Amino acid sequence: MTRPIPELSELRPLGDGPRLVALIAPAGAVLAERIDTTCALLTAMGYTPRLMDNARARHRYLAGTVEQRLEDFHAAFNLADVAAVWCLRGGYGCAQLIDHINWDALPDVPLLGYSDISVLLSAFHARVRRAIHAPVATELALCEQTDGLERQARLEAMASIAPLLAGESGHMSAEHAAGPTAPVEGVLIGGNLTTLASVAGTPAALHVPEGSILMLEDVGERLYRLERSLCQLLESLDASRLNAVCLGSFTGCDSGDSSIEAVLEEWLAPHDIALYHHLPFGHGEHNRAWPVGQTARLDASGLDWSPASTL
């Protein structure tokens, strides 16, 4: 059953459970006014935002040094009664943290974010921890600042987080683009293409279990750069582990006379891997949340997942 989309004042993006939400900036620096607006909106929604101590820090273009970001990261997950740890933004910097995270000291609290946060989501998946590819917290303000169809899409994206935190099944629309048409099942992995390609061959590399469905999106890249990232990513992993590739939005990406679908079809054809596109996630207003590491079923009717199994 489709849920009615609430007004921003009625929105409960994290559901009706524990009210404390930890806000961290593990990557790029965040503008002070965006932090203030985010905290004010969460408070108005009935939550208690806990802005971690170094979230306003700056080190070059980063939200503080590695040490500062790690301090906030560990502290956020160890807050009593925290409902989720929500990243304020992406940018660049998450890969710098992976080798220094004390995984044994992290309680099982879900992590929310996307873009550069894809690196952390994959690391959580590899360690059987809850990770949700979802809008970052500062995008709450965009629900308030836009109108019409864009506003509705952003509200729907935010509203899609709560069912995942509650452990509910979910659905996302998808269209077959190329390759085999038979339904497939697999573990949901992926995120931002450029980010994931940049960490190939490193300790932060994408975790790819047998039988994966690779979800990809990007923003602001020329097609040749996207192909370069695709080549880097696909050549760095065992393609036999992929059951399908799904494309979200490639916002502001200049494809010229070709398309990302055409490039991927060429790369995937020798491996007989199905390609789907037009999934509503990525940079832009259509950014529905999806559960990293959960098993899903994919066919022409869309992508469906159940919380029953996680790999």
Image: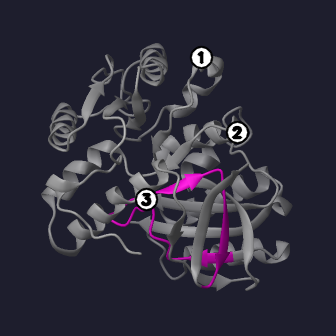
Residue 157 percent across, percent down from the top left: 35, 61
Span shown in magenta: 275-300
State which tag comes first along the sequence, 2 or 1. 1
State which tag comes first along the sequence, 2 or 3. 2
Indicate which disc residue 105 carries: 1
- Disc 1 crowd rating (10 Å Cα; few below 14, some 14-19, many 20+) is few
Indicate which disc residue 219 carries: 3
Indicate the secondary structure of the residue bearing disc 1: helix
Indicate the secondary structure of the residue bearing disc 2: helix
Quarter of the image where one finds residue 38: top left
Q: Residue at x 55, y 81 (%)?
A: 258
118 with respect to 85 (left or right): right
Q: Is residue 36 above or below residue 135?
A: above
Tally of marks: 3
Residue 50 percent across, percent down from the top left: 29, 25
Choose mark 2 or mark 3, whichever is in front. Answer: 2
Question: Which amino acid type is marked by label 3?
Answer: Val
Q: Would you say residue 290 sits in the magenta stretch?
A: yes
Q: Which residue is mark 2?
A: 126
